[in-house]
């Protein structure tokens, strides 16, 4: 077939396709300059497969329900206002696209979960490019499958945890894609419960009151290239297995119980190539097992890793520990985890055969970290001469610190990540 | 007074011990920064050295200097000069020259390698510590007539502030860990200028860890601008009170 033929064939196909679409679906325009000024009216007029274009303006129509497959698109960010009373948009049909709206001021309630956009028991819904401002919950999905939530911006102004909902809240859902969203000021930035096979990537979750990311019973999910910063308590993940966390950034989560990641009852998971910086605790592990912590960077954290004695068969391998106040802390002398080939900037050993691996093992738990674990107020004496002396003596002859917790192959130079 | 201060500074800066002090600080700080590739780690290594050496040299050197210039002081007292002026110019001369040595020795290296808020605080605390420990040595030497006893007392005082105090605090902490003692701990640090300086620097280096549990209280106290001001005032009190007491004592002393 000649080149010309190919092009004309393609053109034919396009025209044919277009005409089919044209024949089957229509476009309804909503706005002051058009016949339809009311969104609810437009939805009533539409048939499955239609496109509704909503033009610039403020629409206060209470609860808008989309109950048929529609492309629901905002032109120039029209405002859907819930006047602090209603759930703004309810999607109750599959194959709906919600694109380009400014949704604000949903109702607040401590009895119901009122959301800016709520998707009920359906599948293949796309929510994209919306600005959600000052809603109780931002985007709420329940029992929905194969949905896409992308490039939304969620802003809330929560004052207390019980007075605000989550940014993106997914409950009993499956195969979702959550990407490119920014959540700020909610209770949890992204919350998944009983949600499986989901990909969460390129999201930014910061300054939320509780957790940047929070999941429970959410198995087989993948989290990549997200940034979680300055959240009230960092990131908490619980009661889940088969989690992949890669290339995420966890930073500046400060406070008594703030963690880069809190892993509670997590198993068979990978945490790789992440960056933990400036957190009070980088990773806190409790009841975690068979987790591979590999090639992560821990920088300037208070505690890089806190591994409780209830953790077992975890591998901490080829990570960089730099500038942390304490590298590893634990609460018992029982050690069921392995540490290998990490780079520790506090390592003072030597490498006589020049193979890049230190010749003496490194014990990352210092005596004083054990003391601070028991008496947090002891932090005020940290780095005083007495404390350094205590630490040195303990390093020579380990008595209180777990003897078995050691890296037998410490790297001499930072691991290339 | 100015003339006297100038004379004392010139006298001290020429002394071999002072030159050695400057050179030792210089050697230590430059080698620390040269060994550590990361300047913030260098600051950490320097921290303990400064918190140790600066008070030690300040207190011992000025005690010895006062005892050695006993005859000079007697000569000055015989002149028509108020005793207060003599004593205060002695103090100013010693404190300024020790601070100058510290600046030349450690301050330089810090400014070159670690010009940051932490570095600047470190220089400031170094200078304040010089002043405080000169003042303490004045109090010790004016109260004790015997030179050997006086130097012994100075060493004991240094030992107390640099080490024993921390042991006592640690003991206190273990004994009373059941009680809410965080505020008490903050108050306790005010009782030791060395600890106060350490905590100030700690709040810059180990912010993330200090923000844990009790950290919030430390942070509230020291991290804010007003807390820094309070810390500065406490350090000044640590200079003014011993100096004032020693001046009163010197005024009434039978030489």
Image (cartoon, helix red, strand yellow):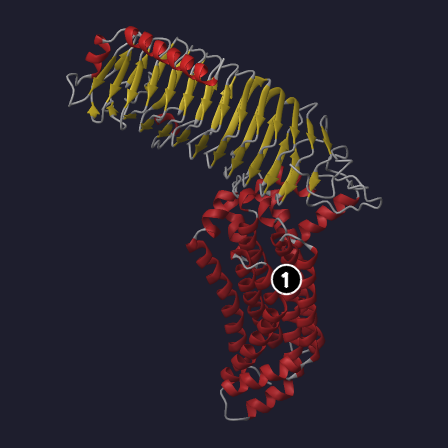
- The x and y percentages for residue A139 are 37, 21
The answer to which of A96 and B193 lies nearer the viewer is A96
> Hey, which quadrant is residue B95 in on the image?
bottom right
Judge whether residue A209 can be spotted in this image.
Answer: yes
Judge whether residue A113 can be spotted in this image.
Answer: no
- The x and y percentages for residue A343 are 70, 40
- The x and y percentages for residue A19 are 31, 9
- Locate residue A12 relative to residue A235 in the image: left or right: left
Image: A114 above or below A399: above
Name which residue lies at 39% across and 25% down.
Answer: A167
The answer to which of B153 and B25 lies nearer the viewer is B25
Quick one: quadrant of the C terminus of chain A?
Answer: top right
**Residue furthest bottom as drawn:** B79
The answer to which of B252 and B98 lies nearer the viewer is B98
Name which residue lies at 33% across and 7% down.
Answer: A20
* Residue of label 1: B50
């Amino acid at each position: 077939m000649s080149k010309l033929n190919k092009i004309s064939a393609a053109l034919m196909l396009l025209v044919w396709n277009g005409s089919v679409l044209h024949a089957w679906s229509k476009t309804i325009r909503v706005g002051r300059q058009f016949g339809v000024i009311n969104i609810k009216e437009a939805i009533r007029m539409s048939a499955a497969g239609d496109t509704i274009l909503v033009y610039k303006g403020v629409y206060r129509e209470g609860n808008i329900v989309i109950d048929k497959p529609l492309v629901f698109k905002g032109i120039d960010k029209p405002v859907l206002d819930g006047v602090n009373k209603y759930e703004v948009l309810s999607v109750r049909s599959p194959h709906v696209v919600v694109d380009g709206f400014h949704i604000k001021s949903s109702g607040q309630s401590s009895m119901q979960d009122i959301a800016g956009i709520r998707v009920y028991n359906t599948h293949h819904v796309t929510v994209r490019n919306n600005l959600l401002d000052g809603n109780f919950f931002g985007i709420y999905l329940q029992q929905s499958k194969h949905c896409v939530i992308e490039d939304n911006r969620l802003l809330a102004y929560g004052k207390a945890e019980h007075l605000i909902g989550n940014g993106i809240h997914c409950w009993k859902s499956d195969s979702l894609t959550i990407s490119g969203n920014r959540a700020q000021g909610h209770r949890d930035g992204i919350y998944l419960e009983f949600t499986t096979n989901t990909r969460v990537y390129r999201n930014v979750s910061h300054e939320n009151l509780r957790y940047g990311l929070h999941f429970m019973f959410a198995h087989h999910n993948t989290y990549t290239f997200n940034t979680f910063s300055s959240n009230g308590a960092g990131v908490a993940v619980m009661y889940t297995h088969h989690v992949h966390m890669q290339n995420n950034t966890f930073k500046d989560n400060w406070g008594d119980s703030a963690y880069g990641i809190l892993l509670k009852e997590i198993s068979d998971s990978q945490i790789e190539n992440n960056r933990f910086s400036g957190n009070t605790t980088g990773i806190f592990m409790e009841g975690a097992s068979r987790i591979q912590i590999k090639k992560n960077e821990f920088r300037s954290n208070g505690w890089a890793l806190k591994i409780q004695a209830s953790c077992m068969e975890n591998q901490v391998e080829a990570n960089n520990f730099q500038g942390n106040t304490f590298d590893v802390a634990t609460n018992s002398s029982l050690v069921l985890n392995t540490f290998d080939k990490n780079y520790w900037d506090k390592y003072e050993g030597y490498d006589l055969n020049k193979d890049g691996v230190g010749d003496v093992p490194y014990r990352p738990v210092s005596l004083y970290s054990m003391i601070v674990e028991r008496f947090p107020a002891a932090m005020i004496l940290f780095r005083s001469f007495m404390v350094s002396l205590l630490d040195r003596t303990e390093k020579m002859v380990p008595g209180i610190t777990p003897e078995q917790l050691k890296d037998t192959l410490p790297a001499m130079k930072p691991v290339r990540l | 007074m100015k003339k006297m201060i100038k004379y004392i500074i010139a006298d001290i800066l020429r002394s071999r011990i002072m030159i050695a002090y400057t050179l030792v600080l210089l050697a230590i700080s430059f080698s620390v920064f040269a060994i550590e590739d990361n300047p913030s780690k260098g600051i950490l290594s320097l921290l303990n050295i400064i918190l140790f050496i600066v008070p030690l040299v300040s207190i011992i050197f000025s005690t010895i200097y006062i005892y050695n210039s006993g005859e000079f002081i007697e000569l000055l007292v015989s002149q028509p000069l108020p005793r207060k002026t003599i004593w205060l110019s002695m103090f100013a001369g010693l404190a300024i020259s020790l601070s100058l040595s510290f600046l030349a020795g450690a301050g330089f290296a810090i400014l070159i390698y670690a010009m940051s808020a932490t570095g600047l605080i470190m220089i400031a605390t170094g200078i304040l510590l010089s002043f405080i420990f000169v003042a303490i040595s004045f109090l010790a030497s004016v109260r004790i007539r015997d030179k050997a006893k006086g130097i012994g007392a100075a060493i004991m005082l240094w030992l107390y502030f640099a080490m024993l105090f921390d042991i006592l605090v640690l003991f206190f902490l273990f004994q009373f860990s059941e009680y809410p003692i965080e505020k008490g701990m903050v108050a306790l640090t005010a009782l030791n200028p060395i600890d106060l300086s350490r905590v100030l620097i700690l709040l810059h280096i180990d912010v993330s860890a200090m923000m844990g549990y009790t950290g919030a209280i430390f942070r509230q106290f020291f991290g804010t601008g007003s807390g820094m001001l309070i810390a500065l005032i406490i350090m000044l009190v640590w200079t003014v009170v011993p100096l004032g007491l020693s001046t009163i004592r010197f005024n009434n002393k039978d030489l």
